[in-house]
Image (cartoon, rainbow, N blue to C red):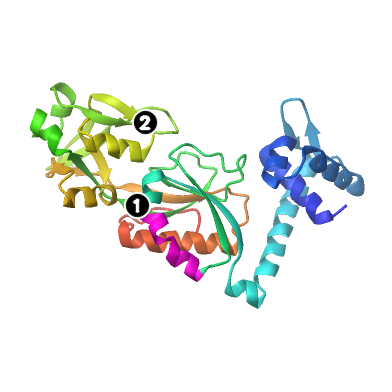
Amino acid sequence: MDRIDAMQAFARVVETGSFTKAAETLQMSKTSVTQLVQQLEARLRVKLLNRTTRKVNATADGAAYYERVVRLLADMDDAETSLSSASASPRGRLRVDVPSPLASMILVPALPAFHALYPDIQLDMGVSDRMVDLIDENVDCVVRGGELTDQSLMARHVGDLQLGVYAAPAYLDRLGTPAHPRELEDTRHRTVGYRWARTGKVFPYAMHRDGESIHVLGRYVLAVDDGNAYLAAGLAGLGVLWLPDYMARAHVARGELVPVLREWRLDPMPLYVAFPPNRHVSRKLRVFIDWIAELMARHAPVTFKGASSAQ
């Protein structure tokens, strides 16, 4: 038995609550993971896991052992990366998930500079607006906009997306320019709805002007759950959009979108990098998070220094 492999297998079973999921994330067979954990229990002469048909969870001894194993594996990673060659060039694979517009418009175009700095880091990037289970899917970190609802995650506040209201010229030619946000609720005007992945619902936007604040949902003919599809719907003239500045800027410059209701202010949307609380922040993950923060400081700097549970 390789004790390190056995510890890693045990830790992943605890984190995922399943031998099958642990095997998938470790790219091993379920039989191998099961045997490693059984051999570890035999060596320690302690039952580490309670196994049922539905769930696997740690015993009291297993939970205490897990905390020590996580620290030990983290210390080993630190020891390896403290070597001069590893310290100079962090290496290894990172699994990340980012929103589709942010990936296509900001992150991916900037990646050549990242890889010039860190040529030995391999990125497996999921590009979506869906909810990601970081533990079950073995994802190192996610980049997400909006307030985090999962308080169990560690998170770093890396930016604030400034929002505006926009419409395509074809839409404005057809239906006119709204003079007040309420016109999006009770007239022939339409919006494009954005369905938030964590709830599946379309939420209203808070808009402010001279002490007046209203929440606008709008009436939509189409609601989508992907940022690129949302933008495409607005460009096609299907309705009024609420967009981060970085998504709208180039289309406004080309005359494909027109700002509307400009005297109204919207609250910025916070942008976070989040990762599991029990996952060791390796040097490769730390430099990636720092790079994201530096990149967003140029595109959407933090305007409110809120609390952050990860630095």
User: For numbered disc 1, what is the local secondary structure?
Assistant: helix
Name the residue type under label 1.
Met
| Residue 97 to residue 310: above or below | above
Separation of residues labelled 2 and 1 (CA atoms): 21 Å
Report whether residue 180 is seen. Answer: no
The magenta region covers 105-117
Q: Is residue 277 left or right of residue 296?
A: right
The total of numbered circles placed on residues is 2
Q: Which residue is mark 2?
A: 195
**x, y percent for residue 50:** 79, 33
Name the residue type under label 2.
Arg
Label 1, residues with CA under 10 Å away: few <14, some 14-19, many ≥20: few
Q: Residue at coordinates 69% horizontally, 41% vertically from top-left?
A: 24
Label 2, residues with CA under 10 Å away: few <14, some 14-19, many ≥20: some
**x, y percent for residue 103:** 41, 50
Name the residue nearer the viewer: 126 or 296. Answer: 126
Q: Which residue is mark 1?
A: 105
Q: Is residue 6 left or right of residue 183?
A: right
Q: Residue at coordinates 15% horizontally, 47% vertically from top-left?
A: 255
Based on the picture, tell me whether residue 142 belongs to the magenta stretch.
Answer: no
Q: Is residue 302 left or right of residue 242?
A: right
Q: Residue at coordinates 63% horizontally, 50% vertically from top-left?
A: 278
Q: Earlier in the sequence, mark 2 or mark 1?
A: 1
**x, y percent for residue 65:** 78, 49
**x, y percent for residue 133:** 56, 39
